[in-house]
Amino acid sequence: MFTVNCIDITAEGQDWDALYAQASEGRRRRADKFIFPDDRKRCLCAELLMRYCLFTDRGIRFTGEPSLGKYGKPYIQGAEDFFFSASHSGKWVVMAYGSSQVGADVEVIKSGSASIAEGCFTQSEQDYVFAEDEGADERFIKLWTLKESYIKYLGTGLSTPLDSFTVFADREPIFTDADEGLVFTNIRLDSEHYLSVCGAGGAAAVDTVTVNGCLGALR
């Protein structure tokens, strides 16, 4: 089973200066490259969640930067049995973690997004998205997060085309023909965001945490 922690970057009263100060040098350099404040916040929160989740789950205080696997999936040297997956979109930064491989994806529901389904989804997935005119964008984003969570579970990145497998988002439970043993958890975080998690077990808990709360736990 996996735990998912989420930070809402629009929450008031968060100490962004303290977050920047405790970030790794590499993360600060990455954050400094962004023009818009929300992009910097998402960048910094992703590292904060990694450290917070590792500490609360394993009691490990990690201040460095993760190593990267063959296709760029991060892992922590010395804690290779701690698996995690981060994602951010809109106001949410999320991290799923547990003791086995996991993939997570969160996305904003955008008007007109369903228009690209033909270029990246299988035929049965396109049939699901366009089953009705109303709600096509919502169904597209739901399915997109499910497929992305599977690819992030694999850790293969763009080497696995989105149309090389099918996710059956209209089934209960949701599954993929690529590996029917996997469990998908799909959640409507709010009216504008979908979150999906993929792994050998479902999400045991989805909790909202704050920047200040995470910083306080790590002091």
Image (cartoon, rainbow, N blue to C red):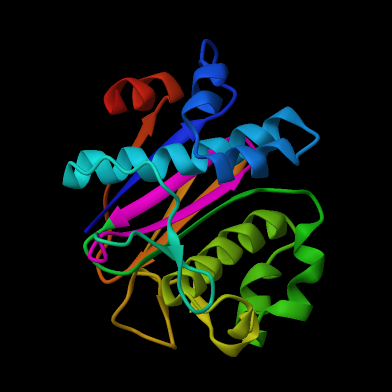
Quadrant of the drawing holding the C terminus: top left
The image quarter in which residue 34 lies? top right
Q: Is residue 84 visible?
A: yes
Q: Residue at x 69, y 31 (%)?
A: 38
How many discs mark residues in the rendered view? 0
> How far across and down, in percent of the image, does residue 97 sit?
31, 54
Outermost residue on the front side: it is: 25
Could you tell whether 165 is left or right of 176 in the image?
A: right
Q: Residue at x 41, y 47 (%)?
A: 64
Outermost residue on the left side: it is: 59
Please say whether residue 82 is one of the residues in the magenta stretch. yes
> How far across and down, in percent of the image, does residue 2 sit?
26, 55
In front here: 135 or 95?
Answer: 95
The image quarter in which residue 212 lies? top left
> How far across and down, in percent of the image, does residue 79 sit?
24, 60
Q: Residue at x 37, y 86 (%)?
A: 179
Could you tell whether 21 is left or right of 141 in the image?
A: left
Q: Residue at x 40, y 70 (%)?
A: 174
The secondary structure making up most of the magenta span is strand
In front here: 19 or 38?
Answer: 19
Outermost residue on the top side: it is: 13
Q: Is residue 119 above or below residue 131?
A: below
> How far across and down, in percent of the image, does residue 133 sit?
75, 61
In front here: 106 or 118?
Answer: 106
Please say whether residue 50 is one of the residues in the magenta stretch. no
Q: Is residue 169 visible?
A: no
Q: Is residue 164 above or below residue 190?
A: below
Quadrant of the drawing holding the N terminus: bottom left
Q: Is residue 10 above or below residue 3?
A: above
The span shown in magenta is: 79-97
Could you tell whether 112 is left or right of 131 in the image?
A: right
